[in-house]
Image: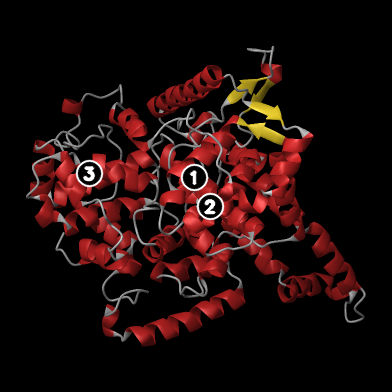
Amino acid sequence: MGSAPWWRKQRSAWTASPPLPSLCSFLSKLRGRWQRCRRQAKLSAQLCLHNPEIKLESLKEDIKEFLKTSGWEKKLQNAVYNELSVFPLPCHPSAPPEHIKESLAYMRKAQGNWEKRILKSLNSMCTELGIPLAQKRSINEQKELLSKWNEMGTDEPDLSLFRPVYAPKDFLEVLMNLRNPNYESSEQPSFRNHLGLIQVPLKVKDIPELKEYFGELDLSTGQMDIDDSANVPPELFENEHLRLGQKVLIKQDSAASQQYVRQGCPTSLRAELWALILNISSQPEDILYYEQLKSNVIQHDLLVDSLIYKDVKLTASNDDYYFVFEDYLYQVLLCFSRDTSVLDHFEYNSATPPKSYIRGKLGMEEYAVFYPPNGVIPFHGFSMYVAPLCFLYNEPSRLYQIFREIYVRYFFRLHSISSHPSGIVSLCLLFETLLQTHLPQLFYHLREIGAQPLRISFKWMVRAFSGYLATDQLLLLWDRILGYNSLEILAVLAAAVFAFRAVNLMEVTSLAAAEAVLADLSTLKVMPLLQIFLFATGT
């Protein structure tokens, strides 16, 4: 684990003169986090000042010692580390604000056009069905919803007329048509031979860079769920890893936790370790906030509520692993749609929250409101971002906090158009590059029969493999997402799956046949696939 300062990896990003707006925004966010626990700290400080051992001449040192012994030093340190983990790297001081969200103009334009398309689809549904985007529930409706809040899965509303606003395949078609208008493919030597569906020349890691980045996954390092890693008996490694994890939890250090989970989490510690990495600690005000969101759900009916119901019914309710959590999914997702704090992530998200207008005030900006309130329109499969977390957290408000933080840190990138290394465009390009470079025969064969590999793997990546892998394997994969603070592992695993099934895939003659070979991933073991692909294939 080491004792290196937690800020070391971020240090190079903060130059001697970071852009003032970015720094001010960062400090503002940090101040907001600190103020949430200010009253507790103030009370602790007041009690401390009554201590007769506190002397004026040693006040500075006494305060430092108090912060350390009371745990506030660690809390502040974790808050700073959390912000540095999600805050975008500073750009040039003269760069316009939109460059913080996305530096490439053609990406911003494509995202804007995609947003218009989504909003048009939503408004068309609203018009066709004659249903308002939002309306207040009657007193009787409020009482009924409140009475069945914990058993909404038993409700069977007629959703036949509702359709998902879009599905992953619709999004893929948009990404396939992305082009950089400043270049012709023939003028891009490094990209000239790329034969995949993604045709934008972004910089992605090659195998040597991936080996270095994911160094803790190598064959000589012990991993959870690996029987013979590092020539150490699995029982011995797991016992020692468990003891180490317990020490990390005692330290309550977010940075140490993030480093620890790179080797996987013991099942018994995962919930607490993930909460520590995400800097989630359930305080009374957090529970109250969740109850306020719940109250908003009870009082107001949104059109997106029906989209959420429909999505859960079409996905998680039909999944052998997740159908038992149907009630939790409704609770979390309905509250999520009302949570205006989610809007903060649009500061570094290439997307812009959609707006609607108060009835009769169309086009008048002063009457524009974000819709839904959190700015996120759910799509087909969205509920699968929540479902695996139900295995870890059985208290709704804590489950909600964890999901919200994982979403605003990672999963929003899977359905936004951007040039970010963890963005879906880069993941698609990384997947295709790995396959074309290191499994060229397989790549060309599938391409020739009309079975472009990305058409199969895209749905895995856009859902972070949720609903495709067995839950224990999925959680081991998500350990690494949190541990490396990156979604790139999704593209590597997708390529590794194709490599594992390469012999069978070389025999197929159609897209349908290729999809059949890759239809069931539930028996796959994540870590052996990743290790073999990255470190044992000679690539």
Residue type, mark 3 in image: Glu
- Label 1 to label 2: alpha-carbon separation: 7 Å
Relative image position of residue 452 (x, y in whole percent): 18, 39
- Label 3 to label 1: alpha-carbon separation: 31 Å
Q: Which mark is residue 326?
A: 2
Q: Which mark is residue 432?
A: 3
Q: Quadrant of residue 263?
A: bottom left
Q: Local crowd at mark 2 within 10 Å, few (<14), some, or many (≥20)?
A: many
Relative image position of residue 133 (x, y in whole percent): 62, 25
**516 with respect to 39 (left or right):** left
- Residue 210 visible at all: yes
The answer to which of 394 and 503 lies nearer the viewer is 394
Q: Quadrant of residue 365?
A: top right
Residue type, mark 2 in image: Glu
Are the two marked residues, 1 and 2, in contact with CB atoms closer than 8 angstroms?
yes
Q: Local crowd at mark 3 within 10 Å, few (<14), some, or many (≥20)?
A: many
Mark 1 = which residue? 312
Please tell me whether mark 2 or mark 3 is closer to you in this view: 2
Q: Secondary structure at mark 3?
A: helix
Q: Residue shown at 64%/61% (left/top)? A: 395
Which scheme is used to colour this image of the protein?
secondary structure
